[in-house]
Amino acid sequence: MEPKADILIVDDIPEHIAFSGAILKNEGYRIHAVTSGQAALDFLGSRKPDLILLDIKMDGMDGLELCRRIKSDGRLSDIPVIFLTAETDSEVIRQGFECGCCDYVVKPFIREEYLARVKTHLEISRKTQSLEAANNELKLFCSAVSHDLRSPLNVISMLIDTLKNELGDHPDEEVIQIADMISDKSQKLTVMIERLLNFSKMCNITPEYETLELESMIKSIFDEQRSAEPDRSVKLIMGTLPRITADGVLIDMLLRNLISNAFKFTRPRKNAVITVTHIPDEEYNIISVKDNGVGFDMAYSDKLFGIFQRLHTDEEFDGSGVGLALVDRIMRRHGGKTEAYGEVDKGAEFRLFFPKI
């Protein structure tokens, strides 16, 4: 077994400890045992096992109370707890899951079932810890990339300004053009770095739910976008939209990405139209955001929500390739999903599936 796991057995009957402990020792696990809830807390004060096997009915502090205390301790809360119990009452088992156990085995247990459950939850715990470690490394990497890349980009911008000043009153037009091109590319790279960081942070954000009025949010974002392009004819058609329960900051970010995309991809249209409607559904509040822009080929729809995946060149439409990935990630953080439909030169539609709470 690699690596060997430390398992704590908590049971006030020594014979039960000896029986279950012997089975686990034969499989190569390191076993620790205590006979009371308080003794378990004392043990956990200085040691952190990989798994806890806990009897529900014990004198003094019972297993349910001990489990609650373990799960309320930030240092111990990630340890999987399996109840070993003679109880078959559904109410007691329900209480066990509510206080934080991950599984239970009814005494007298079958050896193979017992070992299978222990092995499964140890593997789940290890994989969870591995994912958390990888995620923390990714956060550190993104932070380092942000710092290490932004610093030289800032220096490039300063050098370009210095170069322009050195050219004096009669600059070489070709040199100025090249300097502007370098400046433009460095600014785009800076934006890409910022958006990549925003995307990576989305993995760790826990939504703060509130009731949101989508109609007012969309109207406000649309008015801001239109004021930035006052010479265009862009019309918003909006039906009656339901209130949703979601994180206001994240949904604002999501809507801004969708509305700004609709503005961008309808620029070739003399009269652009953006339509936002509610699609009735029993399970979800489905919000449709549709435009009459350039659209896309559905054969490439699987690329739309990938990070830095773009269906248009910079010469056609500017962008970083992060916006729709953010939209999809935000919806997933809310337990929802995103679907996209389009046809070349006939517009695009994005459907947001918000779970009904």
Image: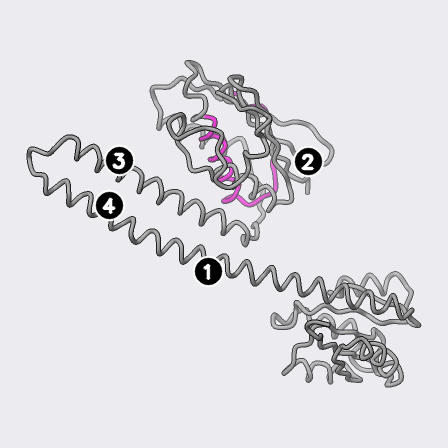
Q: Describe the element under mark 3 as helix, strand or loop.
A: helix
Distance of label 1 from label 2 (alpha carbons): 36 Å
Say which of 267 and 250 sits in front: 267
Where are the magenta residues, as a range?
A: 237-262
Q: Of circles 1 and 2, which is in front?
A: 1
Q: Of circles 3 and 4, which is in front?
A: 3
Q: Which residue is mark 4?
A: 157
Say which of 199 and 299 sits in front: 299
Distance of label 2 from label 3 (alpha carbons): 47 Å
User: For residue 16, what is the image quadrant?
Assistant: bottom right
**Residue placed farthest to the front in the image?**
1
Q: Amino acid at mark 1?
A: Leu
Question: Crowdedness of circle 1 by 10 Å Cα count: few (<14), some, many (20+)?
Answer: few
Q: Quadrant of the C terminus?
A: top right
Q: Position of residue 333 (x, y in %)?
A: 59, 47
Distance of label 4 from label 2 (alpha carbons): 48 Å
Q: Which residue is mark 2?
A: 284
Image point (35%, 25%), residue name = 229
